Image (tube, helix red, strand yellow):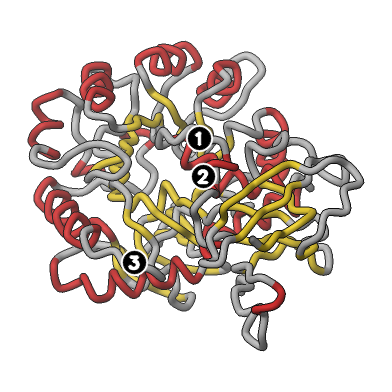
Amino acid sequence: MRWLTRVRLAGDGADPGQEGPTGVLWRVGIDRDGLIARVRPTEPGSRAAGEDWGGDWLSLGGVDLQINGGLGLAFPELNAADLPRLVKLLELLWHDGVDAICPTLVTCAADPLRQALAVLAEARRHHRPGRCRLLGAHLEGPFLAPERRGAHPRQHLLDPDRETLERLISGFEGGPEADIALVTLAPELEGAREVIEELRARGVVVSLGHSGADEDQAHQAFACGVGMLTHSFNAMAGLHHRAPGPVAAALKQGTVALGLIADGVHVAPTMAVLLQRLAPRQLVIVSDALAPYGLGEGAHRWDERLLLVEDGSCRLEDGTLAGVTLPLLEGVRRLAGWGGLEGASIAAATLAPRRVLGDTRPLEQLLLGRALGDTLRWSTTDGRLQWRRPALAPAAGPGAAQGLAP
């Protein structure tokens, strides 16, 4: 057994709001196969032997609950011929520190939706090491409020009811490891309650998004089983002292996950930090990356529309904000830089998404049996949080730092 010492865990092993030298330090034992076999807290002042991490953070890889495509692929447009490029995208995501994604299908017609789900199911069966894993899809729509649709095409929005839901997803299983993991809808729409109940019965997480819900309607939705907000503050009412809205309702409720696009454009840095300080365990960083992820800036096609990419932000020609091309873990670094809560920011993209999908095991248990090279090591360099795939010091060679995010 070989040991890593003075390690901080980015998640349940310590209070996610607690930073600095007072945080809990851990010893991590690695067996001869490179797998994590022991995770133990250490007493303050311990001088246990091992590779000294000096307080660096250890985390799982990222899980992105909202990513719409990449390398020119838009997930709602997938067909069987796209499988090789989809594999390349999954390899890119792994290189970018992401363990798994819920491929997000924005509002589209029924036929392409079902075709995309079938292609994703086929790709899921062929997972290999060195690739990001495909979890169940995130259906963002079509049960959205027209006035809050954002970049979603109006012509494909539908009124929620069980019959329509069945027409869209019949034959596809629900659950994190199945075909559909997450659905975003506007819970105030007539018929939404029965759809929420049906989705929850199938093991699908339901998220409030693209919604005109007020505080009371949001609380009613949470009581029916809605467990998340999709890109908090965007496409919903904001905070107001006499009209609190769904974000405040989720903060008051205390367990509803708060999806956040931490690019500094969708939500101002000050508001992102405020949200984190109010509810560090509820925050879930998502990328909301679109098809140009991994490509250059400039003009790109998105269905029949033109998508303009500049400084990592994607907008339609009319200026409507549509998404980003930034990696998930860039959101971690930005949020940590704005608010200084490094551990909480890391956990928001690595542990919190797993909690949304139902994995409640402590982080120490989630790490056991995992290859050390499949985890992330975070440190601060020149005042900026960085990550890399860790390796034991004796095995480190000229390429040991190549896991640093670009």
Between 182 and 266, the one nearer to me in the picture: 182
Location of residue 161 in the rendering, given as x and y in whole percent from the top left corner: 16, 23
Graded by Cα atoms within 10 Å as few (under 14), some (14 to 19) or many (20 or more), the crowding at tag 3 reads: some
Name the N-terminal-most of marks 1 and 2: 1
Q: Name the residue beneath numbered marker 3.
A: 306
Q: Name the residue beneath numbered marker 2.
A: 366
Residue type at mark 1: give it.
Arg
Quadrant in which the C terminus appears: bottom right
Label of residue 299 in the image: none
Graded by Cα atoms within 10 Å as few (under 14), some (14 to 19) or many (20 or more), the crowding at tag 2 reads: some
Location of residue 96 in the rendering, given as x and y in whole percent from the top left corner: 51, 67
Between 16 and 166, the one nearer to me in the picture: 16
**Residue under the image location 53 percent in, 34 percent down:** 258
Element on which disc 1 rests: loop
Location of residue 331 in the rendering, given as x and y in whole percent from the top left corner: 60, 55
Between 5 and 209, the one nearer to me in the picture: 5
Using the image, determine if residue 165 lies above or below residue 329. Answer: above
Instruction: Please tell me how many numbered marks the rendered image carries.
Output: 3
C-alpha separation, residue under disc 1 versus residue under disc 2: 6 Å
- Is 92 left, or right, of 175 in this rendering? right
Label of residue 361 in the image: 1
Element on which disc 2 rests: helix
**Residue under the image location 24 percent in, 76 percent down:** 84
Q: Are marks 1 and 2 in contact (CB under 8 Å)?
A: yes
Name the N-terminal-most of marks 1 and 3: 3
**Residue under the image location 66 percent in, 41 percent down:** 272
C-alpha separation, residue under disc 1 versus residue under disc 3: 43 Å
Residue type at mark 3: give it.
Leu
